[in-house]
Amino acid sequence: MPPLHPDTPVQYVKGVGPTRAEQLRQLGIETVEDLLLYFPRRFDLRRQAQPIETLRGDEPAVTVAGEVLSVSERPGGKRPFFECVLSDGTGWVQLKWFYGLYLRNQIRPGIHLAASGKIGVYREVLQLINPQFQMLWDPAGAKLDRDELLPVYPAGAKLSSGVIAQIIRRVLPEATRLVQSWFRDDYLDKRALMPRPEAVAAMHRPQDRDHWAQARRRLAYDECLLMQLGIALIRLRQISRPAHPLPCSPLIDQRIRKRLPFKLTGAQDRAVADIAADLARERPMNRLLQGDVGSGKTVVALYAALLAVANRKQAAIMAPTEVLASQHFRKITDYLAGSKVRTELLVGGQPAAHRRRLLDALAQGEIDILVGTHALLTEGVTFSDLALVVVDEQHKFGVRQRTQIRGKGFAPHYLVMTATPIPRTLALTVFGDLDCSIIDEMPPGRGTTTTRCAAIDEMDAILAEVQGRLDAGQQAYFIYPLVNPSPKLQLTAAQQAYTELSGGPLGRYGVGLVHGQMPAPQKEAVMADFRLGRTKVLVASVVVEVGVDVPAANVMVIMHAERFGLAQLHQLRGRIGRSAADALCILVAEPKNPLARQRIETLAETHDGFKIAEEDLRLRGPGEIFGTQQHGLPELKVADLIEDFELLRLARRDAFDIVADDPGMAAPHHQELRRQMLRAYGGKLDLLTGA
Ligand code: ADP
Ligand code: MG
């Protein structure tokens, strides 16, 4: 048999034939290297067997091993069971499995097995009830020198953990020698990291828990490092292209600020300073602007756009939906009323002639600021001199999409805005290619928002309270979750609520109903009624359209709040509290488990979007974010981004240093890293092909 390589197909591994190879392939294991990196999900502790004569009968966990002398069963009765007597030569115990009749085909007199569990005494006989057990084909194998960790691998449909363990155990000694060390010893020593070959071996067969933990730490580091190397390379590629510098001057700054109807908050000033510093450079800005709903991101974006215009360049501002694009456009034209700056809106459904005129004007450089949806940059819209792209609410986009959006031959400065606070973990990963500014202060003159939890049986009191606020001239939302995945049933839930509310004491204030299945014009009409105060109460079946801005609506009752995600609840709550009056948010919930309760309570306690986002991530785990999104980053198998945050930070620093030193990863001592990068990213991001 030829010597193994990391890339050797598993089929050529001892004990693996074509059938096994196919079964392994279904688990994503194609090569020896894949096999080595297929780690146990957990370990079971196999204890060293104790001589039966030494047992007292009150030990919480023992392992005994020996020969089965006899078996018996009681198939009927309330709790049928199967039992056997096991002897190790020093004494005997009874093993008893309730509902264990299926064992009669496996456990017969004369076989050897090891059994573990809690020992007890029943009618003066030593007994193990429902023990874990393992067949011992070789009775001598029962004599462990010490307690042993048994790896449990994620099994396949036709491939048990035991078989996988056997294959890996056999190949491990030879294959471990194939594992390259990625770094020099001093590099590892400085970071207290175990050598990679040892770590890979220990992931499968650790000496003890601590050994395993050290191994895991090393492999988690490696995963984080590969990911951060990719991010560092993306970033390098983005900022290594030239961009038009857009310098600011005291005069320009003054002229821009004169346009704004208010003084910027301290947080807005800081964000503007970050952005102005970026824009003055000859390489593209690459910045994320975070701030809760209502924190005033639009003017910051506008400031940046006007800086481009002052430098005789164009700016594009993009939103995820046409509704939001229109809203941005309205706000911006308000701010710019009476100025010479020409701002236009480009969305679908505009008359063809109008659209053509717009595109012409844009290509001629007659339009300064173009507002539209994300489709702007992908639909062959040509600017004469685009220098700044602002993208709003892009939290659903990953690294890969950003790379695509900008792979179009121009290198504009780039600003991403999001109202969904990004937990620090994600700021280093999915958004890891961006610098970050945070608006953590609300504009002055806002009332406070109080959030309260309530139970469904307090509904009468809640309605009375809402009524009081309606009398005082406020407006109220009643939000219903998607109660049922079937659109029809969901509709009836909201409909029913609407019928009840409009027939009840709130009816005389005017109640509107809006839900996802409504045709757009009807939805718009209902929203307009509410915005203009013709209806005072709005029942919304799913989510009030992001960006809906009705300052007089200062009350929100969220029904079945336990069914919403934390971040979503926070977003919903952001719809109120937009005027000087104090706002009230009532979360009506019947949390059925502690997790749901904790979620609701977190929201009632804090209005800090970042805290909420962190908590949300902690409660739900990053799996949801990393599992389902097309973020373009390699999958993490070992690292846990929340638990391993410090490790992630360390890996990030190291990765950025490595790329700064050796951008092409061409140095001889980076060759293994380079190979691993290609393995992790595949051709996905074209990182090392010199784009
Ligand atoms: P965001 O986009 O961050 O949700 P907006 O930019 O829409 O927030 O701003 C929310 C509201 O606050 C707008 O009505 C805006 O005019 C107002 N606003 C923004 N900045 C200030 C400020 N510094 N002082 C007073 N009002 C402000
Ligand atoms: Mg906004």
Image: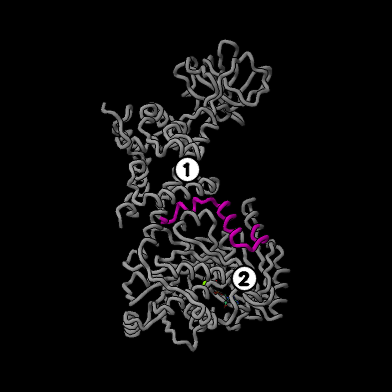
Please give the label number shown on residue 586. none
Q: Which residues are magenta?
A: 602-631
Residue 467 location, quadrant? bottom right
- What is the quadrant of the C terminus in the image? bottom left
Quarter of image, res 611: bottom right
| Viewer can see residue 302 | no
Helix, strand or loop under label 1: helix
197 in magenta: no
Residue toward you, 73 or 277 = 277
Q: Position of residue 64 (x, y in %)?
A: 57, 19
For the point 59% across and 78% down, the residue is: 550
- The circle on residue 442 is 2
Q: Quadrant of the N terminus?
A: top left
Other residues around mark 1 within 10 Å, as few (<14) / some (14–19) / many (≥20) = many
Q: Say what amino acid the circle numbered 1 marks.
A: Tyr
Which residue has dot 1 on it?
A: 221
Q: Nearer the viewer, residue 366 or 665?
A: 665
Q: Is residue 343 left or right of residue 300?
A: left
Please tell me whether residue 608 belongs to the stretch shown in magenta: yes
In which quadrant of this rendering is ligand 1 seen? Answer: bottom right
